[in-house]
Image: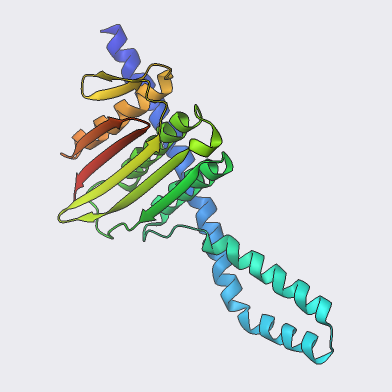
Amino acid sequence: MIKKLISILLDKRISAYQNDLLLKHYDEVQHIYTQMRGWRHDYHNHIQAMKAFMALGQDAEHREYLNMLDADLASVDTLIKSGNVMVDAILNSKLSLAASKQIDVNAKAAVPKELKISEIDLCVIIGNLLDNAMEACMKLPSEARFIRFYIGRHKEMLYISVSNATDSNLIRAGRSFLSTKGSASHGFGLLRIDRITEKYGGFVNRQSEEGAFATEVMLPL
């Protein structure tokens, strides 16, 4: 009874912590979107400034100004835009972190406007999937690391797929797989994914192959 109570309290505390992080990521992406709207608003002013540089023959200044605008626009274009701001927040945060760890990342995302699952629960699933994928990749040399992420509509289901490189040291534990070098947080992440998926009547499929691990999550729409 005491162990069960401790487990419930721990689950709630970690869930609250994850929710706070999601709200932080949400605010960050909203800020970027605001910057992007501001850039569009200033588009006319940028054109006028470049025309002035050209008229004055200030080629070096013109080139520097163009480079500045190009860098500013590139920082916006690298964002994944799924159609859901909160999903965008967690995806861009996690995948940017993965890229900084020299993990080859490929992602596609399209989230329907109407969802039965709460945005918080959906982002907890996505966050844990990507955390586990990064954890597995970091046990490998940089040239072997990869993460492939997809989320989209499949008939009347929301389909999420994550595949990643792994060292193949995986063992089956019930319906799940655990790394022989895995951490406690990895196991907790799997449990969180399973609990939320079951809560909405969805299902999880995990597959382990030589050098790769894949997880599919299906949630009703």
* Relative to 212, residue 3 above or below: above
Q: Nearer the viewer, residue 205 or 197?
A: 205
* Relative to 94, residue 110 above or below: below
Q: How is the image coloured?
A: rainbow
Where, by quadrant of the figure, is residue 191 drawn?
Answer: top left
- Which x, y percent locates residue 84? 37, 57
Would residue 113 be found to the left or right of residue 27 on screen? left
Would residue 99 be found to the left or right of residue 84 on screen? right
Q: Image quadrant for the N terminus?
A: top left
The residue located at (21%, 44%) in the rendering is: 218
The residue located at (36%, 28%) in the rendering is: 189
- Which x, y percent locates residue 148? 39, 45
The residue located at (31%, 57%) in the rendering is: 111
- Which x, y percent locates residue 158? 23, 50
Tally of marks: 0
Q: Residue furthest bottom?
A: 55
- Which x, y percent locates residue 175? 21, 24
The residue located at (24%, 58%) in the rendering is: 114
* Relative to 151, residue 1 above or below: above
Q: Nearer the viewer, residue 87 or 109?
A: 109
